[in-house]
Amino acid sequence: MWVVMDLKKWVWAVLVVLAVAEVGLVLGNVVSFEVQHKFAGRGRNLSAMMSHDVRRRGRLLSAIDLQLGGNGRPSDAGLYFAKIGLGNPPKDYYVQVDTGSDLLWVNCVECVKCPTKSDLGIELTLYDPKASSTSSYVYCDQDFCTSTYEGQLPGCKPGLQCQYNVVYGDGSATAGYFVKDDIQFSRVTGNLQTTLTNGSVVFGCGAKQSGELGSSSEAVDGILGFGESNSSIISQLAAAGKVKKIFSHCLDNVNGGGIFAIGEVVSPKVNSTPMVPNQQHYNVVMKEVDVGGEALDLPTDVFETGDRKGTIIDSGTTLAYLPEAIYDPLMKRILGERPEIKLHSVEEQFTCFKYNDNVDDGFPIVRFYFEGSVSLTVHPHDYLFPIDDNAWCFGWINGGLQTKDSKDVILLGDLVLSNKLVVYDIENQTIGWTEYNCSLSIKVKDESGAVYSVGPHNLSSASSLKVGVLLTFLSILIALLHSSVH
């Protein structure tokens, strides 16, 4: 029998799903992940770009299964992925890095409809608990499961496994059971140096996949959640006293890959704004928008935070979605400086035009201002992207035309966040950023006070090919369902 939780219960469940897992890491407390973007070296498809975000918004903005549609192939969705080791002896697994969810899960050996190959330039591996000397099953009468269910499930008896089912807003799903095993990844030990670190964690063993999770063209081995709740990997490590609850990413949309690190960033410095407390995602408070140095005259309530309202920082969304009350005056101001250009629609979704000169010289800079007098600068080469020789399209999307559930949400995606170091300081409830060349290293401090350089990584062989504008798509969970066994 499937036990379906409402949203409030789901939020609680996510907080506790992995909170009782033991984390026994060895010395050190700065961790880095090799990270690669799926589109490194690959062409783009405009329909797919919008399709990515349509699915993303369904996951991000609703507590129900909301099908939004789209005319792009799901196989063209982009994502960033990292490499971790699981089991003893350890095997490598490539997992989607997800700042919007909390559960770590990987496809398992008995999985039904799990992909067996990937077009990302990586080799997929099915996790086999029986092949690991350190693995153990999690049963329904154990603390992990009883804590997750707020008590022992009816019908639970010794030997029954604790199961899970994750359902996404686009209808895709993963189901399986929980296991406990060693996890292995890189610990920073010196300037641009790492050693392998072992720990123990409870994670999901995926036994059945459906929807786009079974697509081979964008397939990875699983998802590594970096959400804010206590169940995420970073929260587990912090609870064990091994790291600070701070992580950062610098996503390189020129070369692919980038930096994804846990630890306090000391260089470069970032300007930070407070997170909105008690939110499911990384919400902040926007105060003002200006174009070319002049503030837009906007309704006072357009920046309010509430049910289906507010500003979300999400490196997993490709474009930037604005409520109509912001989108219309912003586009009018930008286009007012270039009245001679002729607009046309591409694939019935994108506003595009021909322009032969440097867009940074011909179009205004857009700045978003946030609580704490922090600004996010978006250059024309950020919000405009080329689709052909001297042909450009706007990355601003009118959210009011997408869905009633998300029409008032400001969603700032990868188009404006790439090539910036973004720091999520969960301990102090702030998000900060600064413009940065993501092919350079950053400096991170561990708990001992030692400062080390952490450099970028690029896992996929696809990075050697011609590089276009890269897209991002990091999935966000909408509902976490738990199943019991008859």
Image (cartoon, rainbow, N blue to C red):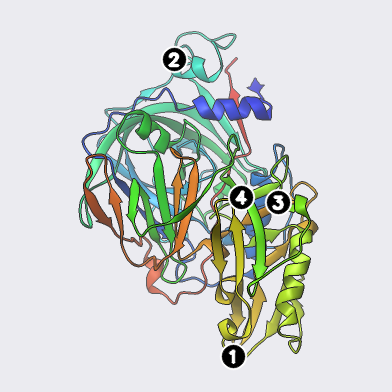
Distance (Cα) linking label 2 and label 3: 42 Å
Looking at the image, is mark 2 or mark 4 earlier in the sequence? 2
Mark 3 lies on residue: 303
Quadrant of the image occupied by residue 298: bottom right
User: Label 4: which residue?
Assistant: 312
Disc nearest the viewer among 1 and 3: 3
The label shown at residue 451 is: none
Q: Is residue 178 left or right of residue 366?
A: left
Q: Residue at x 50, y 52 (%)?
A: 219
Which mark is in front, 2 or 3? 3
Mark 4: give few (<14), some (14-19) or many (20+) Cα within 10 Å: many
Residue for badge 2: 143
Element class at badge 4: strand
| Disc 4/disc 1 C-alpha distance (Å) | 33 Å
Q: Which residue is mark 1?
A: 357
Mark 1, Cα crowd under 10 Å, few <14 / some 14-19 / many 20+, is: few
Viewer-nearest residue: 371 or 248:
371
Mark 2 Cα shell of 10 Å, populated few (<14), some (14-19), many (≥20): some
